Image (spheres, helix red, strand yellow):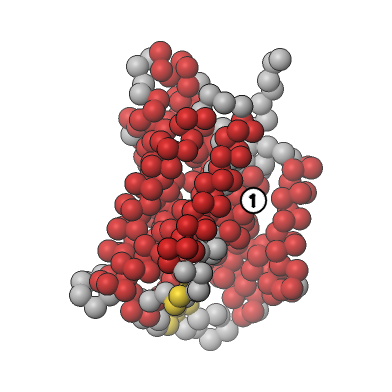
Amino acid sequence: METVLQVLLNGLVLGSVYALIALGYTMVYGVLKLINFAHGDVLMLGAFAGFYIGSSVADSVPMPLLVTLVLSMVICAVIGVTIERLAYKPVRAAPSLTALITAMGVSLFLEYTTALVLGPTPRGFPSEKLLPTSTVMAIPGLPNISNRQLVVMGTALALMGLLYYIVVHTKMGKAMRAVSFDKDAARLMGINVDQVISFTFAIGSALAAAGGVLFALTYGRVDPYMGIYPGLKAFIAAVLGGIGSIPGAMLGGLLMGFTESTASYFVSTYRDAVLFSVLVIILLVRPAGILGRGLVEKV
């Protein structure tokens, strides 16, 4: 019983991080119909920002993890807007294949430039300095719950709740939904489409940075290629839940976390094969995802 609960707890923690990253994919796709394959590398940049900021402020400010998280999110929001303006905006009217190839090129550029500038060697993340590990709950027969697990889940849920509020209850959120539905009609109604797209990239990149910091906090290391697998798994989560759907990204992230945690326990060697098999099955059975809606296009 304790082992089963531990697997579920690990899946919830991991799924919360995947859901954060998947939200970035689904927001950009919802507005631009673009799969931003550089999203996982923005996560990596957020983790590196957290590494340098955390190492600098850990002993000098109160609540260093919060400071590290917020500053990393701000830095990656700026990076996300810059990527959109320099790489994606010039090809916005081009065929979708052009935008897809551009996204792959941006991904490789970020990975190898980071490796060139910072070096390819993995570095230890200052997890203990930012948040010393302690057991918060120890009940006989149940798995121990650490403060780090609670912080990761609580932060992820808080950020997802904040995003939901922005999209549903703010003027910019209404503009985002309008642009997602029809960019041309939104422009005719006076909405600044370029501003909305930049805001979407900023929010998505900030969430990726938060996911990167939480991921590094959990696993204790950063390297230039650390965003590849989390990015791919979060993409699977977005497709699983229904890409373009914010609740779907949250649900897909949690399901991916539970799937990976369960697969790690039973068939750890084939864990990634199980996860990518989920993507194939979903595309075959329900291409629109669990909460996604299929669209009929007239040609």
Q: How many marks?
A: 1
Task: Give whichever of 169, 289 is nearer the camera.
Answer: 289
Pointer 1 local density, CA inside 10 Å: few below 14, some 14–19, many at least 20: many
Which residue lies at the image location 37% right of the left edge and 62% below the top edge? 49
Residue lying at the far bottom of the rendered structure: 140
Task: Give whichever of 66, 230 is nearer the camera.
Answer: 230
Q: Is residue 64 left or right of residue 223?
A: left
Residue 106 shows in this picture: yes
Secondary-structure class at tag 1: helix
Task: Give whichever of 233, 110 is nearer the camera.
Answer: 110
Which residue lies at the image location 55% right of the left edge and 63% below the top edge? 225
Which residue lies at the image location 42% right of the left edge and 33% below the top edge? 197
- In the rendered image, the vertical position of residue 261 relative to residue 79, given as above or below: below
Q: Is residue 19 left or right of residue 68?
A: right
Residue 168 shows in this picture: no
Callout 1 amino acid: Ile
Q: Quadrant of the N terminus?
A: bottom right
Task: Give whichever of 117, 72 is nearer the camera.
Answer: 117
Which residue lies at the image location 34% right of the left edge and 46% below the top edge? 78
Whole-percent x and y of residue 138?
47, 83
Which residue lies under the disc numbered 1? Answer: 236
Q: Is residue 183 left or right of residue 162?
A: right
- In the rendered image, the vertical position of residue 197 relative to residue 57, given as above or below: above
Whole-percent x and y of residue 157?
43, 56
Whole-percent x and y of residue 139?
49, 83
